[in-house]
């Protein structure tokens, strides 16, 4: 069974993990200022956000975790009714604030779809390695 990278418990993939790189709570004056220079609805900016901030923030994941997380995202993307805008909602009680509010992301599904597309390219070698293994040994 695949364990959480830092805990002795089973790993449960959560696509909120992808948004950790644009989480600015208590970092509005540093990371927030950096991110606000980008337009998350503009393709070229979105690609840079994903490569520079989102995927970079997930460096701690092993190749196995990357595969499981990306598969989870793929599953959710295949569900037409899945509400991707909910991931961008401000959650004050959880001390979680993203660089952009849900209503500022014109196409939340498209945002996550772009993450999926780019991660498959950037993580290609890790994904191939994980896919070649017998998951029962994890």
Image: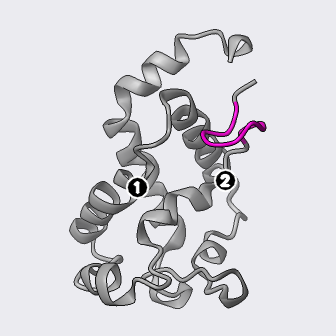
Q: Nearer the viewer, residue 48 or 31?
A: 31
Q: Where does the magenta region start and end?
A: 3-11
Indicate yes or no whether the magenta region holds residue 8: yes
Q: Nearer the viewer, mark 2 or mark 1?
A: 1
Q: Which residue is mark 2?
A: 14
Q: Is residue 5 left or right of residue 53?
A: right
Q: Residue at x 54, y 83 (%)?
A: 97
State how the image is colored.
Answer: one colour
Residue 36 sits above or below residue 110 on the image: below
Q: Position of residue 120 (x, y in %)?
A: 40, 38
Residue 114 in which image quadrant: bottom left
Residue 83 sits above or below residue 70 on the image: below
SS at mark 2? loop
Q: Main secondary structure of the magenta part?
A: loop
Indicate yes or no whether the magenta region holds residue 54: no
Q: Position of residue 88 (x, y in %)?
A: 57, 78
Packing grade of label 1 (10 A; few <14, some 14-19, many >=20) is some
Q: Quadrant for the N terminus, please.
A: top right
Q: Residue at x 63, y 83 (%)?
A: 95
Q: Position of residue 11 (x, y in %)?
A: 71, 39
Disc on the earlier residue, 2 or 1 = 2
Q: Which residue is mark 1?
A: 57
Packing grade of label 2 (10 A; few <14, some 14-19, many >=20) is few
């Amino acid at each position: 069974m695949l364990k959480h990278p830092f805990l002795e418990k089973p790993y449960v993939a959560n696509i909120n993990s992808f948004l950790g790189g644009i989480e600015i709570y208590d970092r509005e004056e540093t990371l927030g200022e950096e991110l606000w220079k980008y337009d998350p609805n503009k393709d070229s900016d979105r690609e840079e956000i994903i490569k520079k901030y989102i995927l970079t923030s997930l460096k701690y994941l092993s190749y196995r975790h990357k595969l499981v997380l990306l598969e989870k995202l793929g599953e959710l993307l295949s569900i037409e009714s899945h509400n991707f805008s909910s991931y961008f909602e401000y959650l004050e009680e959880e001390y979680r604030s993203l660089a952009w509010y849900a209503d500022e992301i014109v196409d939340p599904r498209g945002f996550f779809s772009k993450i999926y597309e780019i991660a498959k390219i950037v993580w290609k070698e890790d994904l191939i390695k994980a896919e070649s293994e017998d998951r029962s040994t994890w």
